[in-house]
Amino acid sequence: METLRLPTSDPAAIKPPPVRWQRELAAAYRIPDELIARLNLPETCREPAQRAASLFPLMLTESYAARMRPGDLTDPLLRQVLPLHAETESASGFTTDAVGDHAAQLAPGLLQKYAGRALLIATGACAIHCRYCFRRHFPYGDAPRKLDDWEPALAALRADESIREIILSGGDPLMLTDRRLAELIALLAEIPHLQRLRIHSRLPIVLPSRVTDDLLELLTTSRFSVIMVVHANHPRELDLDCGPALRRLVRAGIPTLNQAVLLRGINDDANTLTDLCERLVDLGVLPYYLHQLDRVTGTAHFEVAEAVGLSLIRELQRRLPGYAVPRYVREEAGQAQKSPIVNTSND
Ligand SMILES: *Cc1c(COP(=O)(O)O)cnc(C)c1O
Ligand code: SF4
């Protein structure tokens, strides 16, 4: 709860005017009718979209919509954001905490599953709602956290010297304002055993204007080695203003990696994945992981069989240099790492 204060008593209470990315975010599509009108989609998708959006609201930016083909319900970018009737159906084996996040909490908002690195949920908010995301069930609100809220997580980090890397995740940590992000990074930088700061963000893909000079300055002047992990699933996500934003990250000297999720009807063919990997590499971004879908309620229609995923990876290995082939992994509760998928014979 916010405490009451006079607006002028605290300089922090005076809000600076919104910058471009914040204006674009404020104008994001949040109701199906707006998106249907923007893209000339058929009337028949209106009602199912409204129903599925009541479970997990629609959200996407105009920048992302601009990379879609109007009128095409099969567009691979649209498929990632348009609520569908299939989301309201249950499927066996699909649950609301498929990856064991609940058991991995060190402190509120701090997860540790793997040695040497911990993951901080910097905010629950995102600039896009990806229909396949585990987040559709995660119990956090969209309100940005206050600095005090991080104190238990910071205390847990201070107490464990084995943690060398802190991963800012969410939601999307770049939804924080530069000022809030700078404050958080400064607090983390006071913890001497933390060496690396990793940022997991989809904003450079879905809201490229977030990659401002100020952000680059902030990331390149901290004492940490900074690593950026972005999230694009289809080569067309790299169109228009996205490519230049990724290049700016890379040219600023920030190692930038991509993780993708294998999604039925979106990127489950060798040509699409090859194109995605090549275009990333050409922008200076290395393919890191290709994730098997987490089995989260409402996402069964996106699932691709592991045998199919494996044959796609083998095809990528035939076509691409080794560094351009992502590691195909699944996340299993209780494992010491993301589990490499190498054979499916006895699953
Ligand atoms: C995925 C994940 C990481 C990062 O794993 P890497 O293999 O280092 O990329 C760290 N912590 C949690 C809780 C994760 O889910
Ligand atoms: S956490 Fe990532 S995958 Fe999930 S909705 Fe947000 S941007 Fe999409």
Image (cartoon, rainbow, N blue to C red):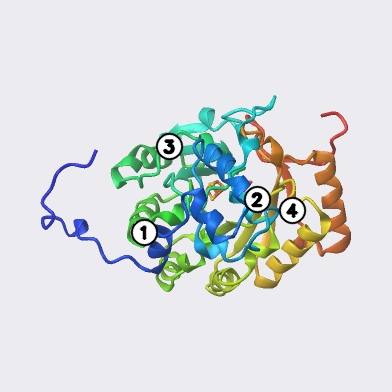
> Marks 2 and 1: in contact by CB < 8 Å?
no
Q: Earlier in the sequence, mark 1 or mark 2?
A: 2
How far apart in space, not on screen, are marks 4 and 2 (Cα)?
Answer: 11 Å
Closer to the camera, 288 or 204?
204
The residue carrying mark 1 is 177
Q: Amino acid at mark 3?
A: Tyr
Q: Nearer the viewer, mark 4 or mark 2?
A: 2
Residue appearing at x 89%, y 59% in the figure: 318
Location of residue 270 (image quadrant): bottom right
In the rendered image, residue 235, in percent from the top left (x then y), is placed at 70, 63
Nearest to N terminus: mark 2 or mark 3: 2
The answer to whether the residues at label 2 and label 3 have Cβ atoms under 8 Å apart is no
- Disc 4: CA contacts within 10 A as few (<14), some (14-19) or many (>=20): many
Q: Few, some or many C-alpha atoms within 10 Å of disc 3 (few <14, some 14-19, many ≥20)?
A: some
Neighbourhood count class around disc 1 (C-alpha, 10 Å): few under 14, some 14–19, many 20 upward: some
| Residue that badge 2 annotates | 79
Quadrant in the picture for the C terminus: top right
* Circle 4: residue type: Asn
Of the residues under marks 1 and 4, which one precedes in the sequence? 1
Q: Secondary structure at mark 2?
A: helix
Q: How far apart in space, not on screen, are marks 2 and 3 (Cα)?
A: 25 Å
Please state which of the two labelled residues, at mark 1 or mark 4, is closer to the viewer. 4
Can you tell me whether the CB of the residue at mark 4 lies under 8 Å from the nearest atom of ligand 2? no
Residue drawn where x is 66% and y is 37% of the image:
331
Residue bearing the label numbered 4: 267
Outermost front residue: 43
Q: Which residue is mark 3?
A: 140
Q: Indicate which disc, 3 or 4, sits on the residue closer to the N terminus.
A: 3
Up-down relation of residue 182 to residue 164 (above or below):
below
